[in-house]
Amino acid sequence: MRLMSSQEANAATVATYLDLVAKGQADDIAELYADDATVEDPVGGEVHIGRHAIHGFYQGLAGTDGTAEIITLRALGHEVAFFWALTIGGAMRIEIISVMTFDDAAKITSMKAYWSPENITQL
């Protein structure tokens, strides 16, 4: 019987993910994902499949000077849902609801981000 990753390990991966997103570190973000993971950000947009495609998606954040704040987080089983905000350069704030699934090693297997232009505030 394989052990599932712990809820604490999954929540820790989320915290690391948010820190790396705020800093725009695509290489390190991609390493948090399983090889065949998927990213749909925002939901309804293009689905990025596999670590290479995911890295390309996050490369758009390079040089970001931001902060990420978890507003609320729920870690249950192999999934985590969290409401968070990304503030970029003191110029804009995006409020996002994200849902991630994890494998037994606490690697992200899927991520969906729920946000639209209505969730962006210019500061």
Image (cartoon, helix red, strand yellow):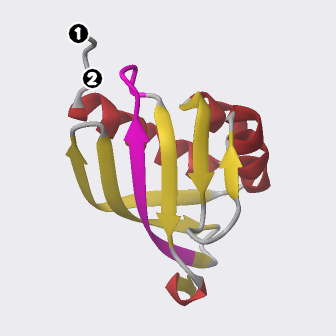
Q: In the picture shown, does residue 32 fall above or below 93? A: above
For the residue pair 26 and 65, the one nearer the viewer reads as 26
Residue 76: quarter of image: top left
Compute the Cα span from label 2 to label 1: 9 Å
- Please check the rendered image and state whether residue 95 is part of the magenta-colored stretch, yes or no: yes
- Which three-letter amino acid code belongs to the residue tagged 1? Met
> Mostly what secondary structure, the magenta segment?
strand
Q: In the picture shown, does residue 121 fall above or below 42? A: below
Circle nearer the viewer, 2 or 1: 1
Q: Position of residue 42 (x, y in %)?
A: 59, 68
Bounds of the magenta segment: 93-106
Q: Position of residue 39 (x, y in %)?
A: 60, 51
Left or right: residue 101 compared with residue 9: right
Determine the residue positioned at 29% across, 24% down: 5
The answer, for residue 52, to whether it is visible in the render is: yes
Determine the residue positioned at 64% across, 35% down: 30
User: What residue is shown with label 1?
Assistant: 1
Q: Position of residue 79 (x, y in %)?
A: 31, 44
Determine the residue positioned at 69% across, 33% down: 51
User: What residue is shown with label 2?
Assistant: 4
- Which three-letter amino acid code belongs to the residue tagged 2? Met
- Please check the rendered image and state whether residue 10 is part of the magenta-colored stretch, yes or no: no
Question: Which quadrant is home to the C terminus?
Answer: bottom right
Of all residues shown, which one is farthest toward the top?
1
Residue 15: quarter of image: top left
